[in-house]
Image (cartoon, rainbow, N blue to C red):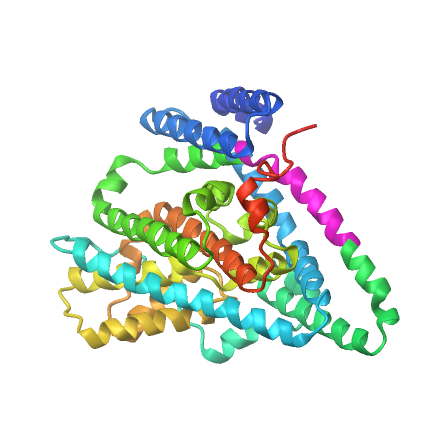
């Protein structure tokens, strides 16, 4: 019988050795007090270089590196459910009035849906300019099976908690979030009649919040190492052949994502929040890097909360409400830009003409579907399926672009997470819960993540 440990060492010793060397370098930089964002950027750059090297040398396995990346993602995911439950509970229970909850809730959803609509229009315009499907002759994989679109009643049932403990164990975030809202609202109602009766509960929630914040700091310190491992693995996995075959789709997607990131988000930050966009983007870099490398808004949530409160200086009350909600329902990239590009791509490769009415339907359906897929796994696939079905376009194109979707998903997730960060700033600014002076001074720029 083979010894699995010896076999793993024998076949992956070089990737383990590379990982240990890079980890040692990053740790040395941390001890030298090199900034957290700088170390994340260095980890990302080294990961790209190592991934390209391993990809060009077919004999080299990357499992040793990707294992470290998976460990990092698992640690981040470990925090998601308790963070969502406790922070939403703490955020809402600290309010003295339900009117305030309704107000910030309305503003949050308005920004989420409004930016998703703009993202859809932008994706549509860029796709029409670049024409990613023109002249392509691509075969549909023989094993393709379209995902079934959940009915309205199924979507509602998936959102409403029936057994919060079971749903938390299954990693279903939205039902846990809704359960937390119910408890928080009950605390407010009971507290309005007898504050003393809910004080022990409020104190417990506050203590749990402080403890969780410390756990988050422990895990976030691993971000530069995790980003290196994840980017190296992803870069090594996808070769030139994959990029070449659907390069037009990748190019179109990233042009649209970058334009949305710079023009829409930058414009909102400058014109509405009235802060320097360059300073804003520099401060939120850790959120963008983690979202890009993990491809998960939920995995980015702990980092995003630290960035919103410690770097942007948005009040924890606003951040704790907007950030968990954004990780569940804010899909500028996945629900706005991507379905629009795939719709135009599909129409072009199947030689189908879309009318102006079709474009209007596309944008409206993108906005609506971004809400409806909140509790469904794989929101980008479902949103795209809904849009294509609404326009009467063949669903087979979803299988055609599947080969490069992971590469595009990195950018989509970065845009999703950034949209949540921007919304937190906009809502906080409108409610007077944004510390502009601290933002401009750059206090707590490193989020206290350097090792002691």
| Snapshot quadrant of residue 148 | bottom left
Q: Position of residue 391 (x, y in %)?
A: 26, 73
- Indicate whether 95 appears above or below 296: below
Is residue 346 covered in magenta?
no
Describe residue 133's horizontal placement relative to residue 39 as left or right: left
- Residue at the image position 13 percent from the left and 65 percent from the top: 351
- Say which of 354 and 310 sits in front: 310
Position of the C terminus, as image quadrant, is: top right
Is residue 214 covered in magenta?
yes
Q: Position of residue 335 (x, y in %)?
A: 39, 63
| Snapshot quadrant of residue 90 | bottom right
- Say which of 209 and 107 sits in front: 107
**Residue 307 in view in this figure:** no
- Indicate whether 31 appears above or below 282: above
Q: How many marks?
A: 0
Region in magenta: 207-225
- Indicate whether 317 appears above or below 214: below
Can you name the residue that lies furthest to the right here?
Answer: 196
Q: Position of residue 68 (x, y in %)?
A: 55, 33
**Residue 378 in view in this figure:** yes
């Amino acid at each position: 019988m083979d010894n699995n440990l010896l076999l793993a060492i024998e076949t992956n010793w070089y990737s383990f050795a590379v990982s240990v060397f890079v980890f040692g370098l990053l740790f040395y930089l941390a001890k030298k007090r090199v900034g957290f964002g700088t170390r994340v950027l260095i980890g990302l750059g080294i990961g790209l270089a190592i991934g390209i090297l391993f990809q060009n040398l077919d004999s080299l396995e990357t499992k040793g590196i990707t294992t470290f990346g998976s460990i990092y993602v698992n640690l981040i995911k470990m925090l998601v459910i308790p963070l969502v439950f406790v922070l939403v509970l703490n955020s809402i229970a600290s309010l003295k009035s339900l009117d305030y909850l309704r107000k910030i809730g309305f503003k949050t959803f308005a920004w989420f849906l409004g930016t998703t609509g703009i993202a859809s229009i932008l994706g549509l315009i860029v796709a029409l300019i670049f024409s990613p499907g023109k002249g392509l002759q691509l075969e549909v994989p023989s094993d393709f099976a379209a995902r079934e679109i959940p009915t309205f009643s199924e979507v509602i049932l998936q959102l409403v908690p029936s057994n919060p403990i079971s749903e938390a164990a299954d990693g279903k975030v939205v039902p846990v979030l809704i359960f937390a809202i119910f408890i928080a609202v009950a605390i407010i109602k009971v507290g309005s009649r007898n504050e003393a009766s809910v004080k022990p509960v409020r104190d417990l929630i506050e203590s749990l919040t402080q403890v969780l914040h410390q756990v988050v700091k422990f895990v976030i310190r691993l971000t530069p190492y995790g980003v290196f491992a994840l980017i190296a693995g992803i870069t090594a996995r996808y070769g030139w052949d994959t990029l070449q075959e659907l390069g037009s789709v990748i190019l179109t997607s990233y042009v649209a994502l970058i334009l949305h990131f710079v023009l829409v988000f930058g414009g909102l930050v400058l014109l509405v929040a009235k802060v320097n966009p360059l300073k804003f983007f520099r401060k939120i870099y850790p959120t963008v890097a983690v979202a890009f490398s993990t491809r998960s808004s939920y995995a980015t949530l702990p980092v995003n909360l630290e960035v919103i409160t410690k770097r942007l200086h948005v009040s924890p009350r606003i951040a704790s409400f907007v950030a968990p909600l954004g990780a569940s329902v804010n899909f500028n990239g996945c629900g706005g830009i991507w379905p629009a590009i795939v719709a135009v791509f599909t129409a072009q490769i199947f030689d189908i003409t879309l009318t102006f009415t079709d474009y209007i339907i596309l944008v409206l359906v993108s906005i609506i579907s971004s809400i409806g897929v909140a509790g469904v796994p794989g929101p980008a696939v479902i949103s795209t399926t809904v849009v294509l079905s609404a326009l009467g376009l063949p669903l087979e194109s979803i299988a055609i672009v599947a080969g490069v979707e992971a590469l595009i998903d990195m950018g989509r997730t970065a845009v999703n997470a950034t949209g949540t960060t921007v919304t937190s700033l906009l809502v906080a600014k409108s409610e007077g819960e944004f510390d502009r002076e601290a933002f401009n001074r750059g206090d707590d720029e490193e989020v206290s993540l350097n090792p002691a």
